[in-house]
Image (cartoon, rainbow, N blue to C red):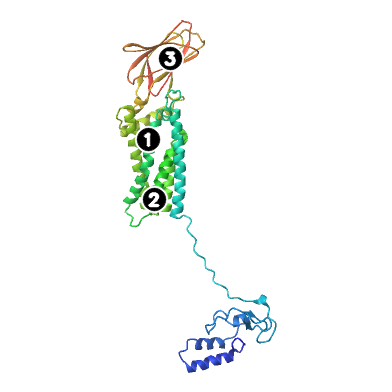
Amino acid sequence: MLEIAGQRPAAAAVWEAIMKMDAHHPLAESAAKRLHLKAPESPAQDLHLGDSDSGIDLSPGLVCPNCGAQNSDEFERCWQCHAQLSRAISTPKPEAVTHEPGEPLLRPETIALTAGVVVVTLLLLGAFLSIKLMLSAGAVPLPTRSLWDLYTQELGITRILTGVLVILAWPVALRLAVSLVKQEEEVAPPALVTLTGLLLGALAYVGTWLPPHLLVLAPLLPMALSLTVIAGVFRLGLARGLSVWALQFLVVLVVAVVGFFAIEAMRLGQFFNPLSEIPAVAHYVREQGGVEVPGSHTIPGKQAPIQQRIQWHSTGAPWLDACAGEAVFTVYTQSEEAGLKFEIQDHTGTVVFEPVQGRQWSTAFRVKAGFAYTLVVSGPPEATATVKTAGLLVPAFID
């Protein structure tokens, strides 16, 4: 009370008397020293309202605007000078503000829910594209002149089955890769790892419908997304993360390649070695890259009769040879009724003989690589025509 009344020396004397009676008093010595120091100019600071030596919380209350004395909340007039107290000068003790830690934004549950929604969306899109591809298989066939024609027109079933195989194999490959790094603690919930694998497989499958100049994104997009997830969610560290990333793609690549050629072997009834087929197909594609119109060749001669011996060369890849299908022959004339006849002969004799009708007439015939054929276009001497052939096999014109 003496301290509150501003009588600091008297208050210090009381504490010193207490210290004489009890030398081990916990507050007497520190309180006496504090009260002997110069009092702050601010009455509120002088009162030390937040850390009273008595242990009593003196903070709540009203400060008298006239003398600066501290009063309880229930007082209407100051106990020291009897001045009217103003409620606007209330100085309540500030309450400690505690901030509860918020939930992390990228929790495993949040990531799993988002991945699940994306997986379902990609699977539905893949199913739609697969059904659309199957329905278009019955359309009028076009000549297969390039690998892209083969990819879009002939490999529908193989593409779908290989895609399903990749979608199913990717979660297994990812979990296998994670388990092989021998992490002491679980890097992610198994359900999240499985969802991630399904997401990568579905993304790769949908990417196979991209146009030819963007088709390279089909493997690149899952590769980039996989690296992001492994680094940001699994947190395996640089060495282990790269090991998981590389191992999963190696497993998926082996499954995709072996599965693709196994399906093609069943479709075509012939075994193909992927190790020799892939380089041969890549070489064929590079050779076609310098041709203005891939797979299209003009047969020499314009005036009937046209007679040309032709031998079709292998593509260098047995799988491409088996997929080559029929060669398409197209005859262009200047009149509707040119009176021309189209004929193909092999070592046994005539195998194709048909009249040419209209200014642009086409027919198809399955040729075999390494065999020689004779093409004949006969008719009136004044009739002119241009003959073109299209297909995967490359023709060589023999004099």
Few, some or many residues within 10 Å of mark 1 (<14, 14–19, 20+): some
Q: Quadrant of the C terminus?
A: top left
Q: On the image, numbered disc 2 is attached to which residue?
A: 191
Residue 161 disc label: 1
Relative to 368, does residue 18 appear above or below in the rendering?
Answer: below
Which amino acid type corresponds to the residue marked 2 in the rendered image? Ala
In the drawing, does residue 238 fall left or right of residue 15?
A: left
Furthest residue toward right: 84
Which amino acid type corresponds to the residue marked 3 in the rendered image? Pro
Q: Earlier in the sequence, mark 1 or mark 2?
A: 1
Q: Quadrant of the N terminus?
A: bottom right
* Residue 196 appears in the picture as rendered: yes
* Residue 215 appears in the picture as rendered: no
Q: On the image, numbered disc 3 is attached to which residue?
A: 300
Q: Earlier in the sequence, mark 1 or mark 3?
A: 1
Residue drawn 44% across the image and 12% down it: 301
Front position among marks 2 and 3: 2
Report how far apart the C-alphas of labels 1 and 2 lie in the structure: 25 Å
Q: Earlier in the sequence, mark 2 or mark 3?
A: 2
